Amino acid sequence: MSTTAPNAKPRRTRKNHWIPVVAGFLRKDGRILIGQRPENNTLAGQWEFPGGKVELGESPEEALARELREELGIEATVGELKLACTHTYGDVGIMILFFEILFWKGEPKAKHHMMLEWIYPEELRDRQIPEANRKILDRIEKAIGVQWPKSSSSRKG
Ligand code: DGT
């Protein structure tokens, strides 16, 4: 006879598969940097914050500094953690940690993205962005400092 504690956690039959991702908010003159994901890649053509997957053995900050070096050719100081979210693509989950990047050496260049753009935070909403970001856009906007009043009429004209 088996005995199960009444409050036992349910047993999971499948292991979850999670990918940790880090991304950075780089700002210049009131704008924020976004990059267009390359062709032949998942989410090709969509606009994202620079960053990528955390490799085994790396801290999130080390991973982001490496990604920014590889993708933009800059040496960045990774600042405060601003936001975290999760999203599911098929049977894989991603957890994205968004960090503030206040200081860096060098000028960001598109070494990985099709294109880089410095946009006003208010413009992000009108870009094609990953669903993982779209579903938390209000939180991203707050983190990157979007200022408008939220009613749609106030954005017109
Ligand atoms: P690789 O070459 O496939 O190992 O790729 P990594 O390490 O450059 O990472 P990447 O960009 O393929 O993976 C990041 C995942 O996170 C990808 O599924 C897209 C998703 N993602 C959603 N929103 C963002 C965002 O704002 N920035 C970045 N970098 N990735 C995002």
Image: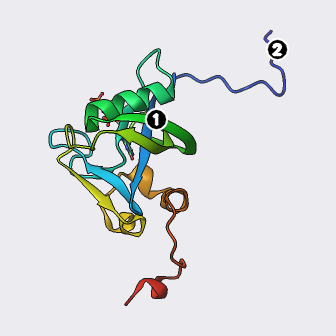
Q: Secondary structure at mark 2?
A: loop
Say above or below: 125 vs 25.
below
Which residue is found at the position 57% from the left and 41% from the top? Answer: 80
Which residue is found at the position 15% from the left and 43% from the top? Answer: 39
Disc sitting over residue 131 in the figure: none
Which residue is found at the position 39% from the left and 62% from the top? Answer: 29
Mark 1 or mark 2, earlier in chain: 2
Which residue is found at the position 39% from the left and 53% from the top? Answer: 131
Coloration mode: rainbow
Question: Which amino acid lies under the numbered mark 2 shown in the image of this protein?
Answer: Thr
Q: Quadrant of ligand 1?
A: top left
The answer to whether 56 appears left or right of 71 in the picture is right
Q: Residue 14 at x, y = what percent?
A: 51, 23
Say above or below: 112 vs 83.
above
Say above or below: 73 vs 157.
above
Inspect this view and state whether residue 125 appears: yes
Question: Which amino acid lies under the numbered mark 1 shown in the image of this protein?
Answer: Thr
Say above or below: 150 vs 18.
below
Q: Residue 112 at x, y = what percent?
A: 21, 38
Inspect this view and state whether residue 17 appears: no
Q: Which residue is mark 2?
A: 3
Residue at the far top in the pictured view = 1
Q: Secondary structure at mark 1?
A: strand
Q: Nearer the viewer, residue 130 or 145?
A: 145
Q: Which residue is mark 1?
A: 77
The answer to whether 137 appears left or right of 119 in the picture is right
Q: Is mark 1 within 8 Å of ligand 1?
A: no
Q: Residue 99 at x, y = what percent?
A: 50, 42
